[in-house]
Every structure is written in C-alpha cells, then in structure tokens.
Image: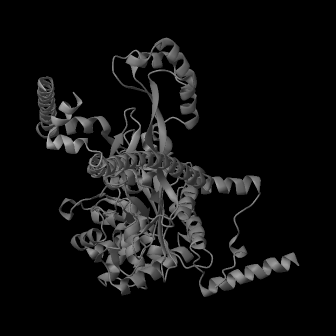
Amino acid sequence: MRGRGTAALTAFGRDRASGFLKPRVDQIRRWDLLPSLCLASLVLLGVLFYVWQHIQVVRLGYEIEHLQAERLALVRQENELRFEVARLRSLRRVEEIARRQLGLTSPMPGQVIMVE
Amino acid sequence: MKHSSAGRGRHRRRVILLFFSLAAALAIISGRLFSLQVHQHPKLVEAANRQYRRLVPLVSRRGTIYDRNGRELAGSLRVPSIFAQPLQVEDPERAASALAGALGLPAHKVLERLKSDKPFVWIKRRVSPEEAAAVAQLGLKGIASIAESKRFYPKQELGAHLLGFVGMDDRGLEGLELQYDECLAGKPKWVVRQQDALGRPIFREEAGDAQGCDLYLTIDEVIQYVTERELEAAVVRSQAYSGSALVMDPMTGEILALANYPSFNPNHYAEAPSFARRNRAVADYYEPGSAFKIVVGAAALEERLVRPEDRLNGEGGAIEVGGIMIRDHERFGTITFSEVLAHSSNVGAIKVGMRLGKSLYYDYISGFGFGNLTGIDLPGETPGMIRRPRDWSALSLASLSIGQELSVTPLQMLVAASAVANGGTLVRPYVARSIKAADGKAARHGSPVQLRRVITEETARTLTGILKGVVTEGTGKAAAVQGFEVAGKTGTSQKLEHATGRYSRKKVVASFVGFLPAEQPRLAIVVVIDEPKMLQWGGSIAAPTFREIARESLKHLRIPPAAGGRFRLAEGILGAASRLN
C-alpha cells in the first residue's frame, strides 16, 4: 500500500513531497505577500492620515469659530465702552459737574493769557 | 483518485461561483457608485450643501459719525431683541405674565402676541442687556433673542438737527443720517456658514460688502455745544418762540456749528414734537430786515453809486414810497453812508437802493445766492423767496432795500456775509469733511467750493470797514468781543401776519450776522431769534449771543487777540494782580 502510493506520485508530487523544497515555497509566498502588505499599510496610513487631517480641520474650525465669537463679543464690548466714554464726556454733563459740584466758572476775558 | 478529482472540481466550481458573486456585487456597487457620483452628483451635492452650508444674512453695522476732531457723535451698537415663535410656546398665559414682568410690558399685549397664528412675532425690540438676561433666565420655550443694530447718540441733544435720526429699520429719516444713508448703512452682508449635524457652526466664509462707511464732519463739538448753549439761553431770556445759530469758516464754507432751539434728543426722537425736530437754520425762512442792508451796501459800493463818506439826507426819520410812509427807529439828519449802515437807517438804505434800480439790485440779490439753494449737504433746504423785478410793486425796491418782501434762510444770510468776509467770493457751505470706507481708506473728501465772485476785494474791504462801525458805534455794540475787531449787521424785522396780510406790531425776528477777526476772518456767525417777547431788537438779543458764541469759539480755536487786544488783556491781568497784592 505504501509502495503503491509512492509509485503513484508524479514528478511534481515528488518534488512537493520532498523536504528540500518545502521551505522555499513558504519563502516565496512570504515575499509575494510583502508588497501587498506594504501597499495595504500605506493605503491604511493614507486613509488614517486623511481622517486625522479631517478631524483636525474640523476641530480647528470649532476652535476658530469659538475664538471668532469671543473676538466679536470683545469688539462689541469695546464699542459699548467707547460710546459710554463718549456719553460721559458730553460737554453738557461735564459743565454741569464743573459748575454745580466743583464750583468752577468760565474765565473772564482778562483772566485768559494767550501763550504764543 | 476519483474522489480527489471530484473534490477539485467542486472546489473549482465554488471558486468560480465566488468569483462571479463578488464580480456581481462589485458590479452592483460600481453601478451604484456611478449613479451617486456621476448621475446624481449635482443633486446630491446641492442636498449636502443645504444640510451643512448655510447662507446667513448679517445686519451690517451702520457707520459712525464723528466731529472734525474724531469725537463720536453717532454710532451703532448690537443690542438684543426678544421674539417669540407662538406655535412653540407651551403655556401662553404663564409665559405672557413672566415676560411682562421681565420686560415691563402690559401682560395682555404680550399675551395677544403669543396667541398670534404667525410663526414669528416681536415681543420687544432693542432691549437692555439686563432685560435680555432676565428673559433668558425664564427659560421659556419658543422665546428667544436675536442681536439687532441700535443707533446711539452719546452726546444726546448735541447736533440733533444736523445728525438727524434713524427709524426702527435702521434707515436714516432726517439730517445727515438721511443725506448719507446709503453710505452709512452699507450693503447687506452675507456669511456662508458650514455647520455640523447639531447646527453648530464649523467654518464661516465671509462674502459681500463690509459695514457702512464712517462720516467725519466739519462740525466742532465744542463750538457746537457753545452755540447750542448760548442760543438756548437767548431764546429763554427773550421768551422767544424759537432760534437758530450757525458758525462757519468764511474762507472754506466749513460749517463749524449748526443749532436750533427748541431741540430734541435723537435717542428718543419719537417723543419730540415735530416743530422741535425742524432744522430751522436751513428749512425755515424769514425776512432779514436791516441785516440785508449788507447786500444793498455791497451792490452800491461795487457799482460805485455811493462812497462810505457820501452824505445822505435822513429826511428826519421818514420817507414816503408808493404812498406808504417808511420810518426810521430814530430821526436822522444828514448822515454818511457808513452811518446809514452803522445806525441802520431805513431812509438812507432806501435812497441807496433807489440809485441801484430794480434790475441791478435783483442781479446782486441773486448773485449773493438768495432765492437759490446754497447746496449744503443737508436735506430739506429751502431756497427762500424773492420775486422777479417784473412782479415788483412801486414799493418793492424800497422794501427790498431794508430787507422786506423777500425771505431768506439763516444759512443764506451767513453765506452772503461770508462772501464779504473772504474778499468777495461766494462759497458753498458743507458739513461732511470726509467719508471713510470700512477698510479705513478715505472714499471722498469734502473740499471748499468757490461758486462765484460777487464783489471785488476792494468793495469787500470797504464794506468790512463800514460793518466794523456797526459794532464799534452803531446798533451792534453788544456784539463786540474784547481784543478782536468784529464786523456785522443787526436786523430786526416785523413778521408778516398771514391772516391780515399786514406786518405785525408785536411779532419780530431779531438777528445779527457778522464775522471776526474783521481783517482776517476765521469765523462767520449768524444768530436769528424768532418772536422774542423781551429784548426784541437784533442788537439787544442776537448781538450779545453772537458775542458769547464768538468769544468761546475763539478761545477754543486758540485764536489770539489783535495787538491792541493783547495790551488790554495785559492791563486787565496787571490790574487783577495789583488787586491781589
């Protein structure tokens, strides 16, 4: 049974069965897979980079939007304060304080000296 | 062997089947991809853009108005406005009660709005930050706030007639706000916004034009304030109906101040009566009376029909023209032409007017700009009224010689006096000095415009000398400013009563128009007081007001007094020092 089986092996089968060829076949398969693996890794890296980049852009977008809103609020506040200062500097108000609270008066013509 | 071959065949079939299955799946996916990416691409892109891109309209900020020194006179702020979406409000009664308390509104009116079948209703617009915070704290569903632009006039009444005001839609309704509305308002601004699934903005790309331009005026805040203060004091002191005053640089036509009394606060313009909002300085006209003798004098001097020293018979203070007796305010004998103007003799002015004749005098009246718009960049200006010589009666030439039978605006009188002050050239008055676009670049500069020469420099110089006499020894003594030479003319004209068609015995318009320093004029000022019940003469109410405005304005502009004036000042200081010692 054993001899019949051996005799029945083809030349190719004999080669395959031989211990000498087996490691070489595995080696060839590994080398065959490597480029595919590298390619897949590169594609994966590319995809990951693209996703990371996209997430970063969106995150920065939120951050910019937040900062812009903050800036806008500060600009509005600055504008409000500017007008508050303008209101407080109203000459009618200043004169009223000067006359009523501080007791100041307008200088008479003889009290003004023009320095040239 | 057989078994192995059958197994291989089966395996092979399976592989083939798997291949075709995968190929079919790939074909289906490819087909679907083709359909989505190529066939339906435009439609899907549009749908996606609708979901995550939004075109948001923004209210562009209305430009700021500054005085000539960059002080804010009008500006816009973003303030919250409270609105409701009635369909989303769960308990309108409770919401109305809470909102009424927070916003100080009648509850029934709020409830009426909340029960509206409209998708959007305003509850209260342009509320204070405190009110907006109180509403937010209520946490009512269907109630929210949105930012709107609100116009503020930080100096309140200052320059109210000049600045005007804007309506609820932020569009100019009066004054410079109306005149430069298109520029100040800017164009609608749109923002393209990308948003996530929750509607939160991720990016925004700005498009469209920026905010409205800023306006820099020729007005000086200090001179404007002084003019308003002194005008108000004069109107109150004389118990007058109203008053107007203008200050201008006679060389350039730059308006430094424009005031009317009564006035109003443009922050609350709706509360002011319409007569208080009227810009009388350019929109109302009056008979100038004796102040118009400047024009008859200029014309007669220019035509060499009279010289300052020429003597005229005062006819004892009365002259009959066309069957009507015209009287002087006092009896004059023989007086020089200079004295005619200094003491404001009607008889003398009529005699000079007669020498001119209708046609020539009309040409000078028109030449000085009467009957035409001055061209100032303010809305509502009136040209006044002057009839053509063919429509004049036998009395008209005499009446026009003393400033009757024609109507002028205070601004026209000021422009005419400025022509004498600057050596004989009529200038166009203007208020907007420059317009700056939102990017900070000056879009336009207002510049002096010389319209035409109306008299020669020599005539202007001679007339200035005569007008100085009005202040030193004539009817305008109260206009004298210590340390400066003042040239000007008083005017007191009776008002025409439309009901009777006759001149009123009680109602008058008192005015003074002049300029200083007389030899090198920096300021031209006109003061018009309408219907004073006390101090009814131009020399007793308008002239002192002129003096106060001039004195404060010169001090503010740091214009030193003439040499003689300095000496007098020094004497005053020495006197004060000796008293202290």
Count of labels shown? Answer: 0
Q: Is residue B128 left or right of residue B368?
A: right
- Residue B533 visible, this angle: no
User: In terms of depth relative to the viewer, which is nearer, B433 or B437?
Assistant: B437
**On-image quarter of the N terminus of chain B:** top left
Asked if residue B234 is positioned above or below residue B304 in the image, the reply reads above
Point 24% across, 59% down: residue: B387
Q: Is residue B85 left or right of residue B571?
A: left
**Residue A19 picture location, percent across and down:** 30, 45
**Residue B308 picture location, percent across and down:** 42, 84
Asked if residue B10 is positioned above or below residue B278 in the image, the reply reads above
Point 16% across, 31% down: residue: B22
Q: Is residue B63 left or right of residue B405?
A: right
User: In terms of depth relative to the viewer, which is nearer, B28 or A103?
Assistant: B28
Locate residue B180: give its quadrant.
Answer: bottom left
**Residue B300 picture location, percent across and down:** 33, 78
- Residue B477 visible, this angle: yes
User: In terms of depth relative to the viewer, which is nearer, B481 or B467?
Assistant: B481
Asked if residue B66 is positioned above or below residue A39 in the image, the reply reads below
**Residue B23 picture location, percent across and down:** 13, 33
Locate residue B463: give its quadrant.
Answer: bottom left
What scheme was used to colour the molecule? one colour
Point 57% across, 32% down: residue: B133
**On-image quarter of the C terminus of chain B:** bottom right
